[in-house]
Amino acid sequence: MTDADGFSLRSVVAGPPAEPILCDVSVDIPASGVTVIVGPSGSGKSTLLRLLNRLDDPLSGEIRWHGDRLDAIAPQALRRQVATVFQRPPLFPGSVLDNFRVADPGVDTDRALHVMEHVGLDGALLHREASALSGGEAQRMCVARALLTRPRVLLADEPTAALDLDARLAIEALARQLADEGIAVVWVSHDTDQLRRLADHVLAIVGGTVAAFGHLADLDASEDAVVRRLVGAPGAGGAS
């Protein structure tokens, strides 16, 4: 994939019609590496992410993916290529294998074990009840489940916010591995340390609009003090 194959948003407005959360957002999100979306609480980070796999549609404006209008792609077809991992991993009743079969009803044991190995999940957990997994194991299982559809992009909405540091670092390492293998990652985070460990590109959303987009070094040097705080730029103080 090339960067030109990513998401393109033009004049996007989204949220409740009476009080939109995103206002006139125009940005190109690359189809490579890890793009981290940051912003104050309520700024529209998660709203933007939900637009990218049609969990929500914009009120106005246009979103394209690989050059195609997003609203012309059936949501179910889109979500097999644009997978999502949430802050609290959604678990379905039954075992880990049963959860995998939600994504791929025909998955066999060999394929299931392969995808578990890919995300660093012990194959001995394949027949364990999903509800008995630890937080870090459950999040890895959800990434593995998403990978069964062979997605081109993985969206992650604060996927490590509820995890301890070791599990958080392990999920970050997995995101980096996937990006290096050619699966673009778009990751919402409020953690500046995490952003600085993970981001190839940074999108700063403030007040429902794009405050900055670029490489971390570009945002570190921004003339906007809010942007510098959001990315934890040296000498900028804490994020607002």
Image: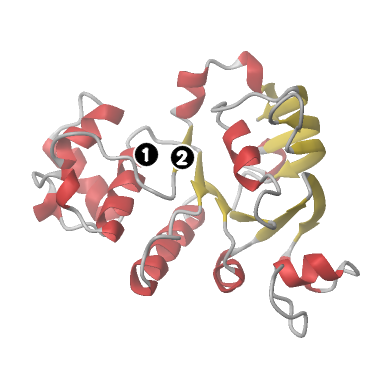
Give, as a three-letter code, the residue at label 1: Ala
Q: Secondary structure at mark 2?
A: strand
Q: Amino acid at mark 2?
A: Thr
* Nearer to me, 192 or 34: 192
Q: Measure the alpha-carbon separation of dots 1 and 2.
A: 7 Å
| Mark sitting on residue 146 | 1
Residue sitting farthest toward the bottom: 235
Q: Which label number is shown at residue 12?
A: none
* Residue lying at 27% horizontally and 48% vertically, measured from the top left: 141
The answer to whether residue 176 is visible is yes
| Residue in the image at 22% along x and 29% along y | 101
Residue position marked by numbered label 2 in the rendering: 84
Whether label 1 touches label 2, CB < 8 Å: yes
Q: What is the image's colouring?
A: secondary structure
In the rendered view, would you say 40 is above or below 92? below
Q: Quadrant of residue 167?
A: bottom left
